[in-house]
Image (cartoon, grey):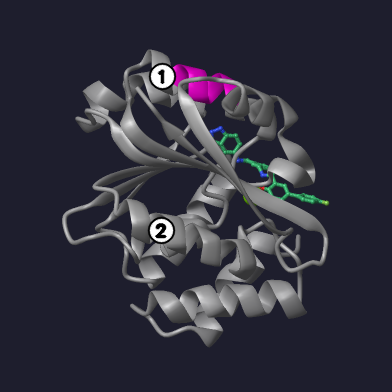
Amino acid sequence: TGSSRPQRMLKAVQKNATKGDPKSVISAIDSYCRHKEWAMNVGDDKGLILDSVLTEVNPSTALELGTYCGYSSVRIARLLSPDSKLITIEFNPAFAIIARQIIAYAGLQDKVTLVEGASGDLIPKMKEQFGIKSFDFVFLDHWKDRYVPDTKLLEDCGLLKKGTVLLADNVICPGAPEYLQYVRNNPRYESRYYPSNLEYTKVEDGLEKSVFLG
Ligand SMILES: O=C(NCc1cccc(CNc2ccc3[nH]ncc3c2)c1)c1cc(-c2ccc(F)cc2)cc(O)c1O
Ligand SMILES: [Mg+2]
């Protein structure tokens, strides 16, 4: 059988990026996905917003829901301070296997812990298994109908603290209407919408940033 889209993305990284250079890995993926084959990475336009929010938060402990091929894991990890960590959760083993290789190619394997499984199962285990007190930053980019239940789960597990920043991808396309409703009408969150476009297209999309108020 032929290769998969994630496998072709990894090949493009190995061919066009420099080992240990996160910036070149990001560019190689963006170029491949813009000119050769679309893929559901957060992309370069929304990626700039992700970068700016990350730089502002400067998290010690970050969580990503939905690794896919590791593009946003690389974007996030490259901006973390020396002793800071990213935990990224991926449900699909075929995606995880590629993501591990792309994260390693960028030289960021020591900052990123990729955990395979479903967010709903793994979030309750974060404290005991990874010694996490709370997260400073959460990037939501997995199944859009899981954004609300997982946000509630993070609250219930005491994994959010006053000032934790949640950043959600795709709130317009494919859309996460229940999530927008939840964070925008909840007194425990201060939310702001960052308009942008769906990765590698002219279609409208954007990121919702929500600060947990405790
Ligand atoms: O749907 C999306 N992404 C999520 C997703 C999708 C598939 C598989 C997985 C499997 N990974 C997974 C699942 C459950 C999980 N629980 N915990 C971790 C975890 C991990 C995740 C998405 C779609 C589009 C899009 C598509 C088509 C189109 F026309 C426009 C836009 C654009 C995006 O930027 C997107 O992010
Ligand atoms: Mg996305």
Magenta residues (range):
148-153
Q: Nearer the viewer, residue 210 or 44?
A: 210
Indicate the position of residue 137 as horizontal and vertical percent values.
Answer: 38, 42
Q: Secondary structure at mark 1?
A: helix
Task: Please tell me whether residue 170 is drawn above or below residue 20 in the rendered image.
Answer: above
Q: Nearer the viewer, mark 2 or mark 1?
A: 1
User: Ligand 1 appears in which quadrant?
Assistant: top right
- Quarter in which the C terminus is drawn: top left
Indicate the position of residue 103 as horizontal and vertical percent values.
Answer: 41, 63
Give the left or right position of residue 160, taking residue 166 as reference.
left
**What amino acid is labelled 2 in the image?**
Ile
Query: Where is mark 1, residue-wise?
Result: 155
Give the left or right position of residue 187, taking residue 44 as reference.
left
Task: Please tell me whether residue 72 is drawn above or below residue 168 in the rendered image.
Answer: below
Give the left or right position of residue 125, taking residue 117 as reference.
left
Residue 163: name its quadrant.
Answer: top left
Q: Does any portion of residue 132 appear in the rendered image?
A: yes
Q: Earlier in the sequence, mark 2 or mark 1?
A: 2
Query: Where is mark 2, residue-wise?
Result: 76
Residue 116: name its quadrant.
Answer: top left
- Quarter in which the N terminus is drawn: bottom right
Q: Does any portion of residue 101 appear in the rendered image?
A: no
Give the left or right position of residue 100, taking residue 26 as reference.
left
How packed mark 1 is, by other alpha carbons closer than 10 Å (few <14, some 14-19, many 20 or more), is some
Q: Residue at x 70, y 25 (%)?
A: 178
